[in-house]
Amino acid sequence: MNISVTTYGSHSALQILKGAKDEGLKTVLLCPRSRRKFYERFRLADELLLVDNVEDLIRGHIQKTLMNMGSILVPHGTIISDVNISKFIRDFKVPIFGNRELLLWESDRELKERLLKEAGIKVPRSFSSPDEVDCPVIVKLPGAEGGKGYFLASGREDLIKKLTKMSVKTNCEFYIQEYVIGVTVYPHFFYSPLKEEVELLGVDRRYETNVDSLGRIPASDQLNLDMQPTYEVVGNIPLVLRESILEKFFDIAERFVEATKRLVPPGIIGPFCIEAACRTPDDVVVFEFSARIVAGTNLFISGSPYSYLIYGEEMSMGRRIAREIRLAYETSDLEKLVT
Ligand code: AMP
């Protein structure tokens, strides 16, 4: 079999490599030099190609080596956050598992909002100017990764005050979004182009600092401390949803799949995550999506309650990707999975 599952050494690389090995596929790791020892400990990569950073992936000799090894690159969050994504999807000629155009839609907030709206999914309001704000908002920086630099404002005046304090122009490229008061939920889906079906493989919630620690401080002390919540992901916590609301999430996921087919053909291929906040069990608002594997799936390397229901074996997202590749290879359908 002249194919190998290839990924970059960070984010969910161990899971992706393990999944490929479990499916009997060859594995290649593009490994940052500084992390060689770490990745070698796990012995999951058949080939380790040392690179300086993720931008090295588009270098001619690296691409040539990957082509010779029949590489299929499985992209993850580091590829979205650490490269110029338009350049990457244009210049990286090695097959990518998934729809490379969608990586661009994920990284552009306006395209992202357009796709969710086109899908008929309930999204938070967004504001083009602080003057329009009439509710609590979360302010997101361009290209911010993992919630870095986001901040909360309780309303218009608070927002203007905070922006002035930061000495930024109020018409700058901040993305101002309604803050949804509700619990956050991050279901991990897989769309199989071979089966033409959406599978739910796990759910997590993110553990974010310092917002998830504020509740440990009594209200009277919070007032004295003048604390501001921040939203940087530190880890992920497993979650199961009330069975009665699972259908709602399948409905959202299927709408998402259909919208990607209409707007970004051939549509989503493989893993994606819907980032939602539930105001009530019936009132679900989607504030983001990821169009590739998310790090929350690292919780379920040996499977989740949901993947067990479907497969009855240890099925991680990484392994599910590899299984789709293996099945497509066996039926000469690989072109349905790569772009
Ligand atoms: P993101 O990078 O967009 O996934 O956001 C990082 C974190 O900020 C999320 O995991 C949430 O905790 C929080 N967050 C982002 N957008 C919203 C929103 N519109 N309403 C409430 N919380 C949000």
Image (cartoon, rainbow, N blue to C red):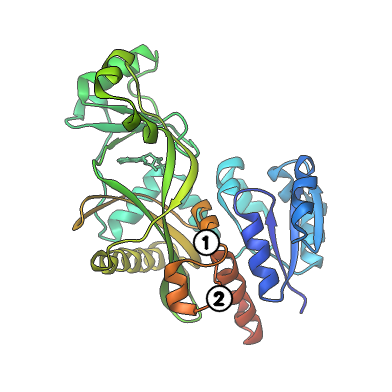
Q: Quadrant of ligand 1?
A: top left
Quarter occupied by the N terminus: bottom right
Relative image position of residue 291 (x, y in whole percent): 47, 57
Residues at marks 1 and 2 touching, judged by CB atoms closer than 8 Å:
no
Instruction: Decide: is 157 above or below 334.
Output: above
> Relative to residue 174, is residue 327 drawn left or right?
right
Pointer 2 residue: 336
Sequence-first disc among 1 and 2: 1
Query: Is ligand 1 within 8 Å of the beta carbon of the residue shown at mark 1?
Result: no
> SS at mark 1?
helix
Question: Which of the 4 quarters of the picture holds residue 92?
Answer: bottom right
**Local crowd size for mark 2, using a 10 Å CA cut-off: few (<14), some (14–19), many (≥20):** some
- The circle drawn on residue 300 is 1
Name the foreground residue: 56 vs 49. Answer: 49
What's the residue at 18%, 32% (across, down)?
135
Instruction: Decide: is 34 above or below 229.
Output: below
